[in-house]
Amino acid sequence: MKLGLIGLPKSGKTTIFNALTRSDAEVASYSSGRVEPNIAVVDVEDPRVTRLSAMYQPKKTIYATIDFMDFVGVDRAEGKELWSGAAMGLVKSADALAVVVRNFANETLESTLGRPDPTRDVDAVNGELLLSDLVLVETRLERIAADHQRGKKTPQSQAEQKVLELLHEALGAERPIRDMELTDEQQKIISGFQFLSRKKLLVVVNSDETSYGKNDQVIQALSARFDVVEFAGDFEMELARLDDQEEATAFMAELGITESARSRLTTLAYEALGLISFFTVGPDEVRAWTIHRGDPAVEAARTIHSDLARGFIRAECFSYDDLIAAGSEKGVREAGRFRLEGKEYPVQDGDILNIRFSV
């Protein structure tokens, strides 16, 4: 999964990035001149993988991963594009965008940017995404119109024009594409555009240590429209840098934090995107795989390797919970919890699969 961190300048995106990834990217209260995004690939913290690895003692243990991408602040003050060409490509490749909003006290920032207002800042960023998509739609509609004037009118171009006109109307009314009810065919027509307002939007409220956990009104207001998580950014960045886990846990408890920033944002993103994990196990490798909730067994097989999907016969299947309860695969079989499933079986979170195939 790829998750892009975006927001207005000085919202604390890079602080959150460091807290999530244990990186040491530069953080400053002034413009650093940075153009390229900070990028880090980190493991999804899943204790089930750790437990399976302890049981099977494999040669390799592979967790699912998340690519966190920290982009420069959204700012059109100088009439520039939101991001450079390369950075825009990375933004468009993200599975979801997390808007970091300032909710911490800082006299220097408040003297130039005003007091923190998370709702205002989310709306500002969302407005920029809508505008970016609107410009893209208008540009494409102009090209289609020019082609039609030159006699290059096809059923495909007419269908595309019709869908884009619907998008243009919605975007002009400040309605993101993600909120539109489009048919499967309409979704297919626009699939190649990678519209920003079509992506799932998460909100990270970046509070200070003093106010963390005391912003119910702000959280509730934002939660009516978005999936929201609150971090104590500076505090959690320092926590991520501690080598002593017991010390970090003690500090977290003082502030009422029960899980790491990475774990909380990962859980939010998985739920928002409808993602689940299944596992493959054995003496060579224990590995977590990510698919969408409701995906059939043949799609899980394809996630592992295309040959497994092409030659799919059956999926040997049992759940992580049943394995832990029984203590071993033998115990799972004896308890009657071992199953053979077909192509259309909807894989469940925590399933352990072994694909039978023939190519």
Image (tube, rainbow, N blue to C red):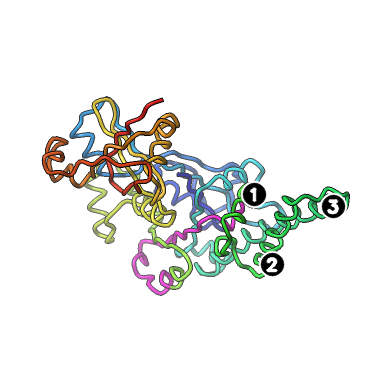
Looking at numbered disc 3 in the image, what kind of residue is underneath it?
Ala
Q: Position of residue 350 (x, y in %)?
A: 28, 46
From the image, which quarter does the C terminus lie in? top left
**Which image quadrant is residue 315 in?**
top left
How far apart, in angstroms, are the residues tagged by discs 1 and 3? Answer: 19 Å
Q: Position of residue 184 (x, y in %)?
A: 56, 55
Q: What residue sits 28% from the left and 44% below the top?
A: 351
For mark 3, give the secondary structure: helix
Q: Position of residue 91 (x, y in %)?
A: 57, 47
Q: Position of residue 156 (x, y in %)?
A: 72, 50
For mark 1, give the secondary structure: loop
Residue on which the image places disc 1 = 193
Q: Magenta segment range?
A: 195-220
Foreground residue among 43 and 294: 294
Can the viewer see residue 112 in this picture? Answer: no
Q: Is residue 213 magenta?
A: yes
Q: Residues within 10 Å of mark 1 (few under 14, many from 20)?
A: few
Residue on which the image places disc 3 = 146
**Which image quadrant is residue 145 in?**
bottom right
Looking at numbered disc 2 in the image, what kind of residue is underneath it?
Glu
How far apart, in angstroms, are the residues tagged by discs 1 and 2? Answer: 17 Å
Foreground residue among 155 and 142: 155
Residue on which the image places disc 2 = 169
Q: Residues within 10 Å of mark 2 (few under 14, many from 20)?
A: few
Q: Is residue 226 magenta?
A: no
Looking at numbered disc 1 in the image, what kind of residue is underneath it?
Phe
How far apart, in angstroms, are the residues tagged by discs 2 and 3? Answer: 20 Å
Q: What residue sits 63% from the left and 40% below the top?
A: 86
